[in-house]
């Protein structure tokens, strides 16, 4: 059970960074910027304001965050399965 | 004493189960009653029909009369995209999974390649949305179903690869060896022996990929405008100057639930476990 629980926790953590549809369709990031997720910010900067360079930089930032979480996960995964 | 404790544990388990079921089903109940509410009732806390509010069919009638074509197109687009993308992903995924399970690669280790596929699950789609947008723009594929099929296949294929790899690993290799002895080529043994035996995993993978693609929103929003918009974009498109029209959102999402439910119920019977149990003796 333990490896499965940890896998699920990791997936859910990473998935939480990808949240986009709910804030987009319900609140459009508002009130103010209270529900603006990073994914949503990348979308507005890149494909609404067409600041593609800045949005790409933010996208790389998001990638780094998920990679850090992913690396922690892979280290554990290797311990368990190899 | 221990019997009594067992009973207590059982009651606790049932309480947890009931709470979990309510937790899952309550949003559906809320969507159903919202679709029958008058706009004024939606923003009041009213949950019991005929007692706290008077249900009306107006929302459903307006949706069908005024926006019928739009919703039908959305559902058809969603079905086309989800079916094509999940079938393509499973086709490529089973080939790759078979390779990873049966062959031993020398340049890159099998394990490294599996890790690579697994790491794709961690890739945030937002990191690739701008490159994909520019790519599809230069390929003149914006607002086509093909663009969404390709993108969604990219994102669900790693999952299909991993599931199919595990499935083929569990299949006894002796079954295929028997086929080789009888003169099958590697390809024939894959198509005629391994693939039919892996059918339950294939079906399960198709369903899960279908669900992933069906719920995909970010790329659908970025890569389509009107013609190829799938249902998720149509649901989100109820936004009005007065805010989100929740009564239309709930009618549309209830319509969007129907196709995946039908699919899941029809293919459920193909998911059986232990088909190869006892196929190899000793």
Image: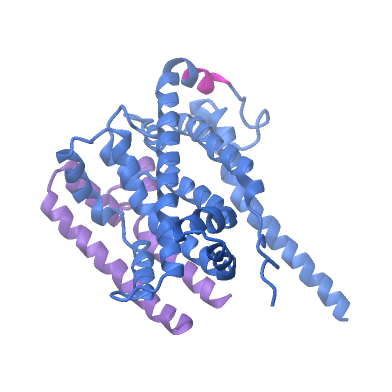
Chain colours: A purple, B blue
Horizontal arrangement in the rendering, residue B121 relative to residue B5 (left or right): left
B133 and B45: which one is in front? B133
First to last magenta residue range: B57-62
Residue B58 included in the magenta stretch of the image: yes
Q: Nearer the viewer, residue B241 or B46?
A: B241
The answer to which image quadrant residue B263 occupies is: top right
Q: Judge by depth and name the residue closer to the eye, A26 or B72.
A: B72
Residue B229 sits in quarter: top left
Residue B98 position within the rendered picture, expressed as x and y whole percent measured from the top left? 45, 62
In the image shown, does B23 or B161 lie closer to the viewer?
Answer: B161
Overall secondary structure of the magenta section: helix
Residue B240 image position (x, y, % from top left): 34, 29
Q: Residue at x 35, y 73 (%)?
A: B105
- In the image, what residue occupies the spot 69% across and 59% down? B17
Q: Is residue B247 shown left or right of residue B77?
A: right
For the N terminus of chain A, give its image quadrant: bottom right
Identity of the residue furthest to the top in this view: B65
| Position of the C terminus of chain A by quadrant | bottom left
> How many numbered circles are shown?
0
Is residue B108 in view? yes
Q: Is residue B159 visible?
A: no
Is residue B277 magenta-colored?
A: no
- In the rendered image, residue B126, in percent from the top left (x then y), is placed at 27, 53
**Percent position of residue B257, x then y:** 53, 37
Please give left or right for residue B9 compared with residue B29 in the image.
right
Q: Residue at x 57, y 66 (%)?
A: B171
Residue positioned 18% across, 39% down in the render: B139
């Amino acid at each position: 059970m333990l490896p499965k629980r940890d896998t699920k926790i990791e997936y859910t953590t990473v998935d939480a960074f990808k949240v986009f549809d709910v804030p987009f369709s319900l609140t459009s990031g508002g009130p103010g910027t209270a529900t603006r997720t990073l994914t949503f910010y990348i979308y507005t900067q890149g494909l609404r304001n067409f600041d593609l360079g800045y949005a790409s930089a933010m996208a790389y930032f998001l990638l780094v965050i998920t990679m850090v979480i992913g690396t922690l996960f892979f280290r554990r995964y290797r311990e368990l399965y190899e | 004493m221990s019997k009594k404790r067992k009973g207590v544990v059982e009651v606790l388990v049932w309480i947890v189960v009931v709470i979990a079921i309510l937790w899952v089903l309550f949003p559906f109940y809320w969507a159903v009653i919202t679709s029958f509410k008058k706009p004024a009732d939606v923003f009041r806390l009213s949950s019991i029909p005929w007692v706290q509010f008077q249900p009306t069919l107006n929302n459903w009638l307006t949706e069908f009369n005024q926006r019928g074509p739009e919703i039908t197109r959305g559902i058809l687009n969603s079905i086309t995209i989800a079916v094509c993308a999940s079938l393509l992903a499973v086709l490529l995924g089973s080939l790759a999974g078979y390779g990873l399970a049966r062959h031993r690669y020398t340049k890159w280790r099998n394990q490294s390649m599996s890790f690579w596929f697994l790491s794709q699950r961690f890739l945030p789609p937002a990191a690739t949305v701008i490159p994909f947008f520019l790519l599809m723009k230069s390929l003149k594929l914006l607002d086509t179903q093909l663009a969404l099929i390709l993108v969604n296949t990219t994102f669900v294929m790693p999952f299909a690869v991993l599931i199919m790899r595990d499935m083929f690993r569990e299949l006894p290799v002796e079954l295929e060896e028997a086929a080789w002895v009888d003169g099958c080529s590697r390809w024939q043994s894959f198509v005629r022996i391994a693939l039919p035996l892996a059918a339950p995993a294939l079906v399960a993978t198709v369903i899960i990929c279908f669900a992933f693609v069906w719920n995909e929103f970010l790329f659908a929003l970025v890569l389509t405008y009107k013609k190829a918009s799938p249902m998720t974009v149509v649901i989100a498109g109820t936004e009005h100057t007065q805010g989100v029209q929740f009564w239309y959102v709930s009618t549309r999402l209830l319509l969007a639930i129907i196709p995946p439910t039908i699919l899941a119920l029809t293919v459920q019977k193909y998911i059986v476990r232990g088909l190869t149990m006892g196929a190899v003796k000793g």
